[in-house]
Image: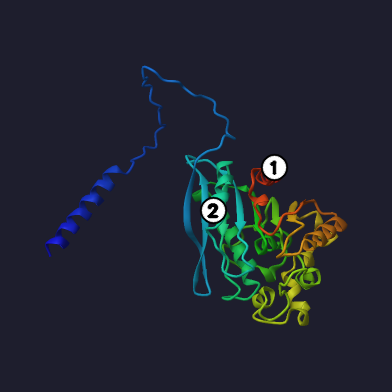
Amino acid sequence: MKKIITSLIALVACATLSAQLQPNFSSAPFEPSKAEAKAMTTLTDIPQNERVSVNYQGNVVYDHQSDMDLVIQLITPAGGWGKKYPCVVFIQGAAWYAQAVYSQVPNLMEFAKRGYVVASVQHRPSTTAKYPAQIQDIKTAVRFLRKNAARYGIDTNNLFVWGDSSGGNLSLLLTVTADQPQLDTEAYGTESVDVNACVAYYPVTDVLRMQEFERGNWDHISESSPTGTIFGGIKVMENPDIVKTLSPITYVSPERAAQTAPIMIVTGNSDRTVPFEQSVIMADKLEECGYDYKFYKIEGADHGSYEFWTDTLFDMVDAHFRAHMK
């Protein structure tokens, strides 16, 4: 009993100290200190594009579906209270299964240092909910971010999407299906799902042609394949009208070109998971239909290999986003 009482006293003391340490900000303008040290160098006019520290807020719940909380890993530039930043919605690939939502947080912090709010979005895994739940979740997350832009310091005029593998598939789907109500929900009202630009790393673009280009031992067409699973365990090639709704290439047409955000596709030609040709056929379709797009082949790169997570590629992604800021 004595130990319990001692612990309670300690907790009360900690809570009291914590309350005392909480800042009490006034609404009046904050005047910088004029104190001078005997030996001090003053730095002024540091450029805004200088790398900055970041804040990380994990597991921000944006929706609850299929008996699970859907969360966002939110990374923001530090010290930006009252400022608005462009936002990158990132979709972690996982063959549409459960995503390792924390795995790219260290890399994504680089973009927060460059002055972006980065929102890594979780969607329902295919083993929990059938398609189109996954793209519906992504669209719901975009609307959530728009709805809560003031809270998270987001400039709603500048939203971008970026994903890899199945996340690249969903980033393309978000970009090319804004006018497809069957792939949407009514969550967060009339907030827009439009983005300024899209980046897709080694994406699945046409599920009906995955096996056609397969050079390894991957199964893309059986009931237990990733594509079969996302539709509830069906044989892919026997259900073309159903499964093609997961293919971004299905929604590409000359009529939609002008209203679609610019797209950047980056894929390695030694990809052993998603055939390189998936990006080739998508790029050719975008070219044929008059879309604004760029397609980069990384010579010798594999699926998710180091090249995609270097400063060279980050500079290219950053430049693509900045070229389409308002």
Which of discs 2 and 1 lies nearer the camera? The answer is 2
Q: Quadrant of the C terminus?
A: top right
Residue at the spot x=61%, y=56% of the render?
Answer: 90
How packed is label 2: few (under 14 Cα within 10 Å), some, or many (20 or more)?
A: some
Residue at the spot x=25%, y=51% of the render?
Answer: 15
Is residue 110 placed above or below 228 in the rendered structure?
Answer: above
Q: Is 303 displayed left or right of 65 in the figure?
A: right
Is residue 212 placed above or below 74 in the rendered structure?
Answer: below
Question: Residue 151, image x and y in percent?
Answer: 49, 50
Residue type beneath disc 1: Ala
Number of numbered labels in the structure image: 2
Q: CA distance from mark 2 to mark 1?
A: 20 Å
Question: Residue 289, image x and y in percent?
Answer: 86, 58
Is residue 17 placed above or below 260 in the rendered structure?
Answer: above
The mark found on residue 250 in the picture is none
Question: Residue 167, image x and y in percent?
Answer: 65, 62
Picture quadrant where residue 184 is located = bottom right
Residue at the spot x=57%, y=45% of the render?
Answer: 110
Q: Is residue 326 visible?
A: no
Of the residues under marks 2 and 1, which one precedes in the sequence? Answer: 2
Picture quadrant where residue 132 is located = bottom right
The mark found on residue 105 in the picture is 2
Q: Quadrant of the N terminus?
A: bottom left
> Looking at this rendering, what residue extends furthest in the left direction?
2
| Residue linked to disc 1 | 319
How packed is label 1: few (under 14 Cα within 10 Å), some, or many (20 or more)?
A: few
Residue type beneath disc 2: Val
Is residue 248 placed above or below 81 in the rendered structure?
Answer: below
Q: Is 325 displayed left or right of 283 in the figure?
A: left
Secondary element type, mark 2: helix
Residue at the spot x=68%, y=78% of the render?
Answer: 228
Secondary element type, mark 1: helix
